[in-house]
Image (cartoon, grey):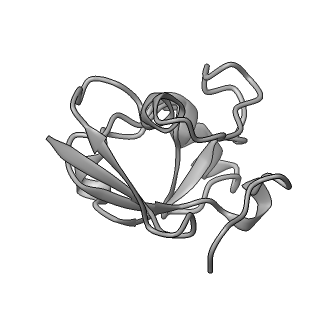
């Protein structure tokens, strides 16, 4: 089993029981409102997350993520939640540009 900690959501901790599912799946399954404009197809960057620790516990970048990295739309510490499969403990943050207005974030 693995855990996902969302630093700027007051250290919210999620348990990952199925390590074949994406980060976005785990966020939504646990009742968190996380943006995803393209329907989780890797066609946009609205679901991106900043990975603070545990990048080695996330699946390799997909072709879509590599494309967005090359275009400068994803920073080296960012991944698409809809493309990233969590295999171990990770700590993430919602990037400032992806924060939703109706969600209260911590610093």
The image quadrant where one finds the N terminus is top left
Q: Name the image quarter holding residue 72.
A: bottom right
Q: Is residue 94 left or right of residue 101?
A: left
Q: How many marks?
A: 0
Q: Residue at x 56, y 53 (%)?
A: 49
Q: Residue at x 72, y 41 (%)?
A: 46
Q: Name the image quarter holding residue 86.
A: top left
Pick whichever, 45 or 69, lies toward us: 45
Check the image and report above or below for 99 versus 24. below
The furthest residue to the right: 101
The furthest residue to the bottom: 107
Q: Is residue 69 left or right of residue 98?
A: left
Image coords of residue 99 (percent x, y): 75, 57
Q: Residue at x 59, y 62 (%)?
A: 75
The image quadrant where one finds the C terminus is bottom right
Pick whichever, 6 or 41, lies toward us: 6
Q: Is residue 37 left or right of residue 22?
A: right
Image coords of residue 76 (percent x, y): 50, 63
Check the image and report above or below for 9 versus 69. below
Q: Residue at x 61, y 59 (%)?
A: 94
Pick whichever, 59 or 9, lies toward us: 9
Q: Is residue 8 left or right of residue 17?
A: right
Check the image and report above or below for 107 versus 45. below
Image coords of residue 36 (percent x, y): 70, 32
């Amino acid at each position: 089993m693995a855990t996902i900690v969302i630093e700027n959501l007051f250290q919210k901790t999620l348990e990952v029981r199925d390590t074949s599912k994406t980060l976005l799946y785990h966020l939504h399954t646990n009742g968190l409102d996380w943006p995803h404009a393209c329907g989780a197809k890797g066609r946009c960057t609205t679901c991106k997350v900043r990975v603070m620790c545990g990048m080695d516990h996330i699946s390799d970048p997909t072709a879509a993520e590599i494309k967005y990295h090359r275009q400068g739309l994803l920073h080296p510490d960012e991944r698409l939640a809809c493309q990233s499969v969590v295999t171990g403990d990770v700590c993430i943050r919602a990037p400032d540009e992806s924060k939703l207005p109706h969600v209260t974030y911590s610093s």
